[in-house]
Image: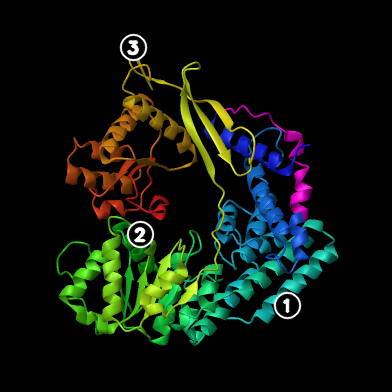
Amino acid sequence: MTTNNEVLRDIWVRLKEQEFASSSDLSSNREMWNKLLYYALSSVTDYLCEDNLVANQQLRSQLEFAAKFFETLPQIDLDVNRLFGDEELMLFSATAYSFTGYPGASAVVLKGLTGDKLSLTERVLAEAIRYGDANFPWENSQIGLTTSLVFSGHEDISILYKQVDSLIEDAYRRDDDMDIIAAECVKKIIRQCWENATIKLMPNFSDTDQQKWISSLTAGKLHPVLWGAQQELGKHNVFRGNSAVVQLPTGSGKTASFSLILRAGLYRDSFHVAVIVAPFKSIRDEIYRDLKLQFHDEEIDINRISTELKVDFSNFSLTERPAIIIVTPEKLLFMIRHNPNFLDETGLFIFDEAHQLDNSERGITFELLLSTINFLVADEIQKVFVSAVIGNPDEVSEWFNSGNNDIVSELQPRKFEKVLGYSRWNNETNHGELLIWNKLQETGPLVQFPYFFAPIKIRKNKTQPDFTIRNHTAGIRWATALTTRQFMRGGMVAVYAPRKDTIKGLAKVFLELQKRSPIAIDDSESIAALCNLFELNFGKDSVLVKAYQSRVFIHDGNIPDSIRGSKRKYSVVIVYKYSCTRSQLAY
């Protein structure tokens, strides 16, 4: 008997075949695709009658399944799939994601909507999922406009509830099944979101006036709804100024949490200077860019102190208006040794990626910094120790800040869907193969794409990859480039190089591949200008420059920050180990 997961796996594999333009060895169950529609939709309607999704884990699993099913099926461009491009399914995918607490996934699905094939009630549902966001290709409904006003603090929630009740009554009066479900989903989503609305919870969590939060919400600088991580911080009084050891798993909204901690402190006037310690330049720069946007046009200075060993903070004003300093551990130690007086005005410390204490290379410096601050700064000053993984929070808390902390460790890591696999060369078929597995397929063999990439002729009697010779280095690099070329159909690809001396070799192969088998690249004026800047700095004969011109970007410490931080559209990013963050690859 075919299980639901096996059918969803079949749909997912067809999507990958379409993405890779390559067939797999998996037979299809296409006659079962439409039969799952009723099961998936019933999961959504069952939730409308459920008050506690946390207690009903089976229903949560069903909703997560429905979200993936509704998202994937409309993407399959096959003659047998009549639901290709079905916006109604995409809408209910976003709805199911929203119900299960995946607002990011929900927003991604909604980006593809035009609204042309949605009813007016279904459009209202899309607006409710995005808290009245007006960035849809249709004119906002009255409910959408009211939702935006309510979640920014300009309107009372009771008015919105009355409008939603009228929407539901109208759907039942017209006796339209899908509109009835959509209208009931609107009510459920608004009630669910209002329970955790920023404008409702943050004034209480931070002991501040509600009016202080309205301007930031109106300007779109804060998310209208608190995620689970921010709710836990509020329950543990972190927004009231308590020190804490905080475990924030990946994807839980760390940057948003930092912004809320900083705003709460500013609105309470509890600090004049706040210091955020980031272990790496890439993370420091990422936090700096995010906070510059979050506090744009506000009476606060955001400063990114460089890692160079020079006194570049001597003219930094600590007297006129509040300031946030983002700095690496080494630079902060340097600042303390040369001018410790600024600590007297510092009322908040945030230590990001604090698990780097365990780093064999830089952990000693981080630990020395923490010990220095513990010695020089009073226990009453708020200090927040943040890490994605803390195996022993009680022991860390006892050492950090003399144990005067709340411990926030209730958040469970979110399980993102992962696709794992590997490519290999098959001498018999003279082709590269791809073998992939994802969590939809818990048992059984990997899905195999036997003709994933073909060899390429580089000279008269020479093809690559060539594994017939003793040294396989060139063959591995060509296999990497050809595999990457296939993945580029879905967007930018990051290739991680184990050693710095591998980077240029890989770049040369990508350049040769583009020469032998060219593909279209972004040719905008802004990219051309950046290429020209790069050429002026490194010379036209540089491999790095030529790679950059082909949209193959090398990311390591030798590249100037101004170029690394630019907004860009690259085909491939070759990265040395952990020289950048994931969000830097997500431009």
Q: CA distance from mark 1 to mark 2?
A: 55 Å
- Residue 461's tag is 3
- Residue 162's tag is 1
Within 10 Å of disc 3 (Cα), the crowding (few <14, some 14-19, many 20+) is few
> Measured along the vertical axis of the image, is residue 13 above or below residue 72?
above
Tell me the kind of residue under disc 2: Asp
Q: Secondary structure at mark 1?
A: helix
x 25%, y 39%: residue: 544
Q: Does residue 39 belong to the magenta stretch?
A: yes
Which comes sooner in the sequence, label 2 or label 3? 2
Task: Please name which of the two marks, 1 or 3, marks the residue nearer to the observer.
Answer: 3
Q: Position of residue 184 (x, y in %)?
A: 75, 65
Q: Nearer the viewer, residue 161 or 392?
A: 392
- Give left or right: position of 347 versus 454: left
In the current view of this chain or complex, which residue is farthest to the top? 461
Q: Secondary structure at mark 3?
A: loop
- Residue 395's tag is none
- Give left or right: position of 198 versus 455: right
x 26%, y 55%: residue: 562
Tell me the residue that label 2 is attached to.
358
Quadrant for the N terminus, please: top right
